[in-house]
């Protein structure tokens, strides 16, 4: 009996030491406590209202239609100042929300309706999103929502997991809306909040950006989780994960049909082309991290979905 007790005690100590060796590192501004507040004046053609936009960045108040450069934060956001054809418009689908004595981020999927000249309805579906990267403002091309988004940031570490606090609201019906400018229709599909991490090894050739996938994590939330899930952990897997039993098609290379873009050495936005899987021991050069209220591409979504996020951290 004494020998069994000693062996059990040794095993517990070993497990404790293994876990105690982990290091948790907060991503800057990932505690959701600091936000820059922007006031964008919309064009008279759209009614001339002032829209309030938020950026996850050092606390600040910015008045006037000025491009946010994202120089002081790693976080891009679905909120943006757009000026297609010189018409100013602001859209806000991600905002701070009180949580206890502090704040969290709330991402909503919304059908944004704009009335031009008081009679022409323009409607677009936008999923509230936070991601590592930046948005080139003002957004000029309404037909290419990804053209102004620089996806991912330089990153050479290899975390074991992503850790967040979260809760969700998910519409159980298997239908969603595609809304693009003047076209609005209902289609089959189940929209779900999701979080993903893609670690990439990137390089440039003749102005084109290529990448190999070093690490992968992508998780979707299929149903409502109404209570806060604190310290939820999502493991990152390295190397070619396409043969793993848990692999899903949306985890594959180029999962967003070329939506990921980056700035090349000439300052031009180009597609990031994932051309293969890296060996598990290779080091990444960049990381893509996204937390979003919807898993479909631009223009698609379910307006009832919401994703609350707090305390975004890496686990090493």
Image: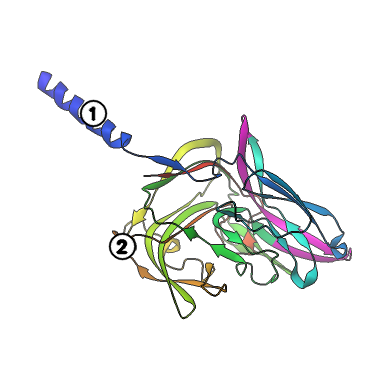
> In the image, 56: left or right of 257?
right
Residue closest to the eye, 125 or 103: 103
The C terminus - image quarter: top left
**Residue denoted by label 2:** 243
> In the image, 72: left or right of 62?
left
Against 55, is 301 above or below?
below
Q: For residue 104: magenta?
A: yes
| Residue 25 in view in this figure | yes
> In the image, 154: left or right of 141?
left
Task: Give the quarter of the image for residue 34.
Answer: top right
> Residue visible at 75% across and 67% down?
83
Task: Give the quarter of the image for residue 140.
Answer: bottom right
- Residue 233, x across and y down, in percent: 42, 43
Q: In terms of secondary structure, where does tag 1 sit?
A: helix
- Residue 97, x across and y down, in percent: 66, 39
Rendered image: mark on residue 13 = 1
């Amino acid at each position: 009996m004494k020998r069994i007790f000693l062996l059990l005690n040794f095993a517990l100590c070993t497990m404790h030491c293994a876990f105690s060796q982990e290091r948790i590192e907060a991503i800057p501004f990932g505690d959701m406590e600091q936000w820059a507040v922007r006031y964008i004046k919309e064009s008279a053609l759209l009614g001339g209202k002032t829209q309030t936009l938020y950026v996850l960045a050092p606390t600040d108040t910015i008045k006037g239609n000025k491009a946010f450069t994202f120089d002081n934060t790693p976080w891009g956001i679905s909120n943006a100042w757009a000026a297609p054809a010189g018409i100013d418009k602001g859209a806000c689908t991600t905002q701070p929300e009180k949580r206890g004595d502090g704040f969290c981020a709330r991402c909503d999927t919304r059908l944004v309706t704009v009335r031009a000249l008081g009679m022409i309805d323009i409607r677009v579906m936008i999923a509230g999103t936070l991601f590592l990267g930046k948005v080139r403002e003002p957004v000029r091309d309404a037909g290419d929502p990804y053209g102004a988004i620089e996806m991912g940031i330089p990153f050479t570490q290899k975390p074991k997991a992503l850790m967040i606090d979260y809760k969700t609201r998910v519409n159980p019906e298997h239908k969603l809306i595609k809304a693009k400018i003047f076209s609005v229709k209902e289609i089959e599909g189940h929209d779900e909040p999701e979080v993903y991490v893609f670690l990439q090894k990137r390089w440039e050739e003749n102005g084109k950006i290529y990448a190999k996938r070093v690490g992968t994590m992508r998780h979707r939330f299929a149903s409502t989780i109404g209570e806060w899930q604190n310290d939820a952990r999502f493991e990152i897997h390295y190397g070619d994960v396409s043969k793993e039993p848990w692999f899903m098609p949306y985890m594959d290379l180029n999962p967003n049909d070329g939506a990921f873009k980056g700035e090349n050495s000439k300052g031009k936005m180009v597609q990031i082309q994932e051309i293969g899987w890296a060996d598990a021991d290779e080091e990444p050069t960049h990381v893509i991290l996204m937390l979003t209220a919807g898993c479909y591409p631009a223009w698609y979504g379910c307006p009832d979905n919401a994703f609350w996020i707090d305390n975004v951290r890496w686990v090493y």
